[in-house]
Amino acid sequence: MERRQNYSRKREAILNAVRGTKLHPSAEWVYHELKPSYPDLSLGTVYRNLAQFKSDGVIVSVGTVNGQERFDGATNPHSHFVCDKCGSVLDIEGGPRTDVCSEVSRRYGVSAERCDIVFRGTCASCRKKSEKVG
Amino acid sequence: MERRQNYSRKREAILNAVRGTKLHPSAEWVYHELKPSYPDLSLGTVYRNLAQFKSDGVIVSVGTVNGQERFDGATNPHSHFVCDKCGSVLDIEGGPRTDVCSEVSRRYGVSAERCDIVFRGTCASCRKKSEKVG
DNA sequence: AGAAAAATAAAAATAATTATCAATTTTATT
DNA sequence: AATAAAATTGATAATTATTTTTATTTTTCT
Protein backbone atom coordinates (compact mmCIF):
# COMPACT_ATOMS: atom_id res chain seq x y z
CA MET A 1 0.00 0.00 0.00
CA GLU A 2 1.24 3.44 -0.84
CA ARG A 3 2.01 6.07 1.74
CA ARG A 4 -0.32 8.92 2.51
CA GLN A 5 1.06 12.42 2.35
CA ASN A 6 0.52 15.27 4.74
CA TYR A 7 0.11 13.17 7.82
CA SER A 8 1.95 15.40 10.19
CA ARG A 9 0.28 18.04 12.33
CA LYS A 10 3.04 20.50 11.75
CA ARG A 11 3.09 19.93 8.01
CA GLU A 12 -0.60 20.67 7.89
CA ALA A 13 -0.16 23.77 9.99
CA ILE A 14 2.59 25.05 7.69
CA LEU A 15 0.43 24.64 4.60
CA ASN A 16 -2.52 26.29 6.31
CA ALA A 17 -0.35 29.18 7.41
CA VAL A 18 0.72 29.85 3.83
CA ARG A 19 -2.80 29.43 2.52
CA GLY A 20 -4.32 31.53 5.26
CA THR A 21 -2.51 34.77 4.48
CA LYS A 22 -2.28 37.19 1.60
CA LEU A 23 1.17 38.27 2.74
CA HIS A 24 3.09 35.85 0.50
CA PRO A 25 5.16 34.80 3.46
CA SER A 26 8.76 33.74 3.86
CA ALA A 27 9.88 30.64 5.76
CA GLU A 28 10.80 32.85 8.68
CA TRP A 29 7.35 34.41 8.77
CA VAL A 30 5.66 31.01 8.82
CA TYR A 31 7.97 29.91 11.62
CA HIS A 32 7.17 32.86 13.84
CA GLU A 33 3.49 32.59 13.04
CA LEU A 34 3.30 28.98 14.19
CA LYS A 35 5.82 29.04 17.02
CA PRO A 36 3.28 30.09 19.70
CA SER A 37 0.97 27.19 18.86
CA TYR A 38 3.82 24.73 18.25
CA PRO A 39 6.53 25.69 20.72
CA ASP A 40 8.86 22.91 19.62
CA LEU A 41 8.57 23.74 15.93
CA SER A 42 11.91 23.89 14.19
CA LEU A 43 12.82 26.33 11.45
CA GLY A 44 14.31 23.48 9.46
CA THR A 45 10.94 21.79 9.38
CA VAL A 46 9.37 24.89 7.90
CA TYR A 47 12.04 25.08 5.19
CA ARG A 48 11.83 21.36 4.49
CA ASN A 49 8.06 21.38 4.10
CA LEU A 50 7.89 24.55 2.05
CA ALA A 51 10.42 23.05 -0.35
CA GLN A 52 8.33 19.89 -0.51
CA PHE A 53 5.08 21.75 -1.13
CA LYS A 54 6.76 23.83 -3.78
CA SER A 55 8.17 20.85 -5.63
CA ASP A 56 4.76 19.16 -5.41
CA GLY A 57 3.14 22.26 -6.86
CA VAL A 58 0.93 22.68 -3.82
CA ILE A 59 2.32 26.15 -3.25
CA VAL A 60 4.25 28.43 -5.53
CA SER A 61 7.34 30.57 -5.17
CA VAL A 62 6.94 34.28 -5.77
CA GLY A 63 10.71 34.70 -6.00
CA THR A 64 13.23 36.27 -3.70
CA VAL A 65 12.49 39.59 -2.03
CA ASN A 66 15.27 41.17 0.02
CA GLY A 67 17.14 37.90 0.08
CA GLN A 68 14.25 35.78 1.27
CA GLU A 69 12.13 33.44 -0.82
CA ARG A 70 8.45 34.26 -0.67
CA PHE A 71 5.60 31.82 -1.20
CA ASP A 72 2.02 31.88 -2.35
CA GLY A 73 -0.63 29.35 -1.40
CA ALA A 74 -2.78 30.37 -4.37
CA THR A 75 -1.72 28.45 -7.45
CA ASN A 76 -4.20 29.86 -9.93
CA PRO A 77 -2.48 31.86 -12.65
CA HIS A 78 -1.93 35.40 -11.48
CA SER A 79 0.83 37.98 -11.27
CA HIS A 80 2.45 39.81 -8.38
CA PHE A 81 3.43 43.28 -7.41
CA VAL A 82 6.47 43.75 -5.17
CA CYS A 83 7.07 47.00 -3.34
CA ASP A 84 10.70 48.01 -3.63
CA LYS A 85 10.50 49.97 -0.40
CA CYS A 86 8.79 47.66 2.09
CA GLY A 87 8.97 44.35 0.22
CA SER A 88 5.25 43.66 0.44
CA VAL A 89 3.81 41.42 -2.25
CA LEU A 90 0.39 41.94 -3.80
CA ASP A 91 -1.67 39.66 -6.02
CA ILE A 92 -2.46 41.00 -9.48
CA GLU A 93 -5.33 39.17 -11.11
CA GLY A 94 -5.81 38.54 -14.78
CA GLY A 95 -3.55 38.40 -17.77
CA PRO A 96 -3.34 36.03 -20.75
CA ARG A 97 -0.51 33.97 -19.38
CA THR A 98 -0.99 30.50 -20.83
CA ASP A 99 -1.28 31.95 -24.32
CA VAL A 100 1.98 33.80 -23.86
CA CYS A 101 3.66 30.64 -22.58
CA SER A 102 2.83 28.58 -25.64
CA GLU A 103 3.75 31.48 -27.90
CA VAL A 104 7.16 31.74 -26.22
CA SER A 105 7.64 27.97 -26.27
CA ARG A 106 7.01 27.83 -29.98
CA ARG A 107 9.12 30.83 -30.87
CA TYR A 108 12.17 29.92 -28.81
CA GLY A 109 12.06 26.15 -28.95
CA VAL A 110 11.81 25.88 -25.20
CA SER A 111 9.14 24.36 -23.01
CA ALA A 112 7.75 27.25 -21.00
CA GLU A 113 5.46 25.73 -18.40
CA ARG A 114 5.06 28.71 -16.14
CA CYS A 115 5.21 32.44 -16.56
CA ASP A 116 5.85 34.59 -13.54
CA ILE A 117 5.02 38.22 -14.00
CA VAL A 118 6.35 40.45 -11.25
CA PHE A 119 5.63 44.14 -11.15
CA ARG A 120 7.95 46.26 -9.07
CA GLY A 121 7.66 49.77 -7.76
CA THR A 122 6.15 51.48 -4.73
CA CYS A 123 3.00 50.26 -3.01
CA ALA A 124 0.11 52.51 -2.06
CA SER A 125 1.03 52.50 1.61
CA CYS A 126 4.65 53.45 0.96
CA ARG A 127 3.56 56.16 -1.44
CA LYS A 128 1.50 57.77 1.32
CA LYS A 129 4.45 57.66 3.69
CA SER A 130 6.71 59.32 1.13
CA GLU A 131 4.22 62.14 0.62
CA LYS A 132 4.07 62.88 4.34
CA VAL A 133 7.83 62.96 4.74
CA GLY A 134 9.03 64.54 1.50
CA MET B 1 33.95 70.12 -8.93
CA GLU B 2 31.88 66.99 -8.89
CA ARG B 3 33.35 63.52 -8.91
CA ARG B 4 33.40 61.38 -11.98
CA GLN B 5 32.03 57.87 -11.75
CA ASN B 6 33.49 54.70 -13.16
CA TYR B 7 37.08 55.65 -12.88
CA SER B 8 38.42 52.30 -11.88
CA ARG B 9 39.81 49.79 -14.32
CA LYS B 10 38.22 46.89 -12.53
CA ARG B 11 34.86 48.56 -12.31
CA GLU B 12 34.92 49.10 -16.03
CA ALA B 13 35.94 45.50 -16.64
CA ILE B 14 33.08 44.24 -14.49
CA LEU B 15 30.52 46.25 -16.41
CA ASN B 16 31.96 45.14 -19.73
CA ALA B 17 31.90 41.52 -18.61
CA VAL B 18 28.19 41.74 -17.85
CA ARG B 19 27.47 43.61 -21.05
CA GLY B 20 29.61 41.31 -23.15
CA THR B 21 27.69 38.12 -22.52
CA LYS B 22 24.20 36.78 -23.11
CA LEU B 23 24.56 34.38 -20.20
CA HIS B 24 22.95 36.68 -17.63
CA PRO B 25 25.84 36.04 -15.30
CA SER B 26 26.12 35.75 -11.54
CA ALA B 27 28.72 37.59 -9.45
CA GLU B 28 30.73 34.38 -9.29
CA TRP B 29 30.75 34.02 -13.07
CA VAL B 30 32.00 37.58 -13.54
CA TYR B 31 34.69 36.96 -10.97
CA HIS B 32 36.02 33.84 -12.68
CA GLU B 33 35.77 35.49 -16.06
CA LEU B 34 37.97 38.41 -15.04
CA LYS B 35 40.35 36.67 -12.66
CA PRO B 36 42.86 35.66 -15.38
CA SER B 37 43.19 39.25 -16.61
CA TYR B 38 43.02 40.76 -13.12
CA PRO B 39 44.77 38.27 -10.87
CA ASP B 40 44.30 40.38 -7.74
CA LEU B 41 40.59 40.91 -8.31
CA SER B 42 38.51 40.30 -5.22
CA LEU B 43 35.08 38.72 -5.19
CA GLY B 44 33.87 41.44 -2.86
CA THR B 45 34.69 44.03 -5.50
CA VAL B 46 32.53 42.21 -8.00
CA TYR B 47 29.60 42.08 -5.61
CA ARG B 48 30.10 45.70 -4.60
CA ASN B 49 30.15 46.97 -8.16
CA LEU B 50 27.28 44.84 -9.38
CA ALA B 51 25.16 46.17 -6.52
CA GLN B 52 26.18 49.70 -7.45
CA PHE B 53 25.41 49.23 -11.14
CA LYS B 54 22.10 47.71 -10.27
CA SER B 55 21.07 50.52 -7.98
CA ASP B 56 22.16 53.02 -10.63
CA GLY B 57 20.04 51.20 -13.19
CA VAL B 58 23.05 50.54 -15.39
CA ILE B 59 22.40 46.82 -15.21
CA VAL B 60 19.33 44.92 -14.15
CA SER B 61 18.67 41.93 -11.93
CA VAL B 62 17.04 38.92 -13.52
CA GLY B 63 16.24 37.47 -10.11
CA THR B 64 17.65 34.55 -8.20
CA VAL B 65 18.34 31.26 -9.98
CA ASN B 66 19.49 28.36 -7.85
CA GLY B 67 20.33 30.68 -5.01
CA GLN B 68 22.41 33.09 -7.07
CA GLU B 69 21.38 36.50 -8.30
CA ARG B 70 21.70 36.86 -12.05
CA PHE B 71 22.26 40.10 -13.94
CA ASP B 72 21.56 41.49 -17.36
CA GLY B 73 23.53 44.27 -19.02
CA ALA B 74 20.67 44.94 -21.42
CA THR B 75 18.21 47.32 -19.83
CA ASN B 76 15.75 47.63 -22.70
CA PRO B 77 12.34 46.18 -21.76
CA HIS B 78 12.34 42.45 -22.38
CA SER B 79 11.42 39.24 -20.61
CA HIS B 80 13.41 36.18 -19.62
CA PHE B 81 13.17 32.46 -19.80
CA VAL B 82 14.79 30.40 -17.05
CA CYS B 83 15.46 26.72 -17.52
CA ASP B 84 14.45 24.81 -14.41
CA LYS B 85 16.94 22.08 -15.18
CA CYS B 86 20.21 23.85 -16.01
CA GLY B 87 19.41 27.37 -14.80
CA SER B 88 20.26 29.03 -18.10
CA VAL B 89 18.57 32.35 -18.78
CA LEU B 90 17.35 33.41 -22.20
CA ASP B 91 16.17 36.80 -23.44
CA ILE B 92 12.60 36.95 -24.69
CA GLU B 93 11.95 39.98 -26.82
CA GLY B 94 8.71 41.85 -27.16
CA GLY B 95 5.64 42.22 -25.01
CA PRO B 96 3.48 45.24 -24.15
CA ARG B 97 5.07 45.85 -20.79
CA THR B 98 4.77 49.57 -20.18
CA ASP B 99 1.07 49.47 -20.99
CA VAL B 100 0.57 46.71 -18.49
CA CYS B 101 2.50 48.64 -15.85
CA SER B 102 0.31 51.71 -16.04
CA GLU B 103 -2.80 49.54 -16.15
CA VAL B 104 -1.71 47.76 -12.97
CA SER B 105 -0.71 51.03 -11.31
CA ARG B 106 -4.10 52.54 -11.93
CA ARG B 107 -6.08 49.49 -10.91
CA TYR B 108 -4.22 48.73 -7.69
CA GLY B 109 -3.21 52.22 -6.58
CA VAL B 110 0.46 51.31 -6.64
CA SER B 111 3.28 52.78 -8.65
CA ALA B 112 4.51 49.94 -10.87
CA GLU B 113 7.69 51.16 -12.50
CA ARG B 114 9.02 47.88 -13.80
CA CYS B 115 7.48 44.61 -14.86
CA ASP B 116 9.64 41.52 -14.86
CA ILE B 117 8.22 38.64 -16.81
CA VAL B 118 9.99 35.36 -16.21
CA PHE B 119 9.09 32.22 -18.07
CA ARG B 120 10.16 28.97 -16.53
CA GLY B 121 10.37 25.48 -17.90
CA THR B 122 12.88 23.41 -19.83
CA CYS B 123 15.25 24.90 -22.39
CA ALA B 124 15.83 23.43 -25.84
CA SER B 125 19.19 21.97 -24.90
CA CYS B 126 17.88 20.25 -21.79
CA ARG B 127 14.90 18.92 -23.72
CA LYS B 128 17.24 17.19 -26.12
CA LYS B 129 19.18 15.66 -23.27
CA SER B 130 15.98 14.30 -21.71
CA GLU B 131 14.97 12.68 -24.98
CA LYS B 132 18.28 10.85 -25.28
CA VAL B 133 18.18 9.56 -21.72
CA GLY B 134 14.49 8.84 -21.11
C1' DA C 1 0.28 -2.68 21.52
C1' DG C 2 4.53 -3.11 18.77
C1' DA C 3 7.33 -2.75 14.51
C1' DA C 4 8.48 -0.09 10.52
C1' DA C 5 8.55 4.12 8.09
C1' DA C 6 8.46 8.90 7.89
C1' DA C 7 8.94 13.37 10.07
C1' DT C 8 10.99 16.23 13.45
C1' DA C 9 14.23 19.17 16.67
C1' DA C 10 18.42 20.89 17.40
C1' DA C 11 22.58 21.88 15.93
C1' DA C 12 26.22 22.03 12.68
C1' DA C 13 27.39 22.92 8.00
C1' DT C 14 27.00 25.45 3.56
C1' DA C 15 26.62 28.99 0.37
C1' DA C 16 25.77 33.53 -1.06
C1' DT C 17 26.30 38.02 0.15
C1' DT C 18 27.74 42.07 2.97
C1' DA C 19 30.68 44.71 6.11
C1' DT C 20 35.26 46.09 7.79
C1' DC C 21 39.51 48.31 7.39
C1' DA C 22 44.19 49.01 6.16
C1' DA C 23 46.49 49.58 1.85
C1' DT C 24 46.31 51.00 -2.91
C1' DT C 25 44.71 53.54 -6.86
C1' DT C 26 42.71 57.42 -8.87
C1' DT C 27 41.88 62.26 -9.22
C1' DA C 28 42.68 67.05 -8.09
C1' DT C 29 46.02 70.43 -6.87
C1' DT C 30 50.27 72.32 -6.76
C1' DA D 1 56.12 65.32 -11.49
C1' DA D 2 55.12 65.50 -6.49
C1' DT D 3 51.43 65.53 -3.09
C1' DA D 4 47.21 65.56 -0.71
C1' DA D 5 42.43 64.08 -0.63
C1' DA D 6 38.98 60.99 -1.90
C1' DA D 7 37.40 56.83 -3.68
C1' DT D 8 38.24 51.98 -4.50
C1' DT D 9 40.10 47.77 -3.54
C1' DG D 10 41.83 43.02 -1.41
C1' DA D 11 41.59 40.10 2.17
C1' DT D 12 39.19 38.56 5.68
C1' DA D 13 35.62 38.30 8.99
C1' DA D 14 30.82 38.50 9.73
C1' DT D 15 25.97 37.86 8.33
C1' DT D 16 22.11 35.72 6.62
C1' DA D 17 19.30 32.43 4.40
C1' DT D 18 19.04 27.80 3.64
C1' DT D 19 20.39 22.79 3.83
C1' DT D 20 22.10 18.74 5.93
C1' DT D 21 22.75 15.55 9.68
C1' DT D 22 21.50 12.49 13.22
C1' DA D 23 19.30 10.93 17.19
C1' DT D 24 14.63 11.09 18.71
C1' DT D 25 9.70 11.35 18.20
C1' DT D 26 5.44 10.83 15.67
C1' DT D 27 2.62 8.51 12.58
C1' DT D 28 1.02 4.53 10.17
C1' DC D 29 0.49 -0.31 9.55
C1' DT D 30 -0.39 -4.88 11.32
Image (spheres, coloured by chain):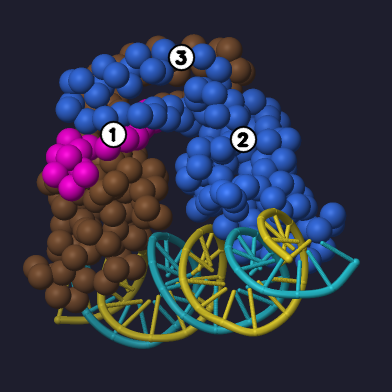
Chain colours: A brown, B blue, C yellow, D cyan
Residue A78 lies, with reference to residue A108, above or below; the image says below
> In the image, is B121 to the left or to the right of B31?
left
Q: Are marks 2 and 1 on the same chain?
A: no
Residue B97 lies, with reference to residue A45, above or below; the image says above
Q: What residue type is labelled 2?
A: Gly
- Give the number of the mark in front: 3 or 2: 2
Secondary-structure class at tag 3: loop
Q: Mark 2 points at which residue?
A: B73
Q: Do the residues labelled 3 and 2 touch (CB within 8 Å)?
A: no
Q: What stretch is highlighted in magenta?
A: A116-134
> In the image, is A7 to the left or to the right of B121?
left
Q: Mark 3 lies on which chain?
A: B
Tell me residue C17's x, y (percent). 50, 59
Q: Do labels 3 and 1 share a chain?
A: no
| Residue B69 part of the magenta segment | no
Q: Residue at x 15, y 50 (%)?
A: A16
Q: Name the residue under label 1.
A: A81
Q: Is residue B121 visible?
A: no
Secondary-structure class at tag 1: strand
| Residue A120 part of the magenta segment | yes
Tell me residue B66's x, y (percent). 52, 49
Q: Which amino acid does label 1 sit on?
A: Phe
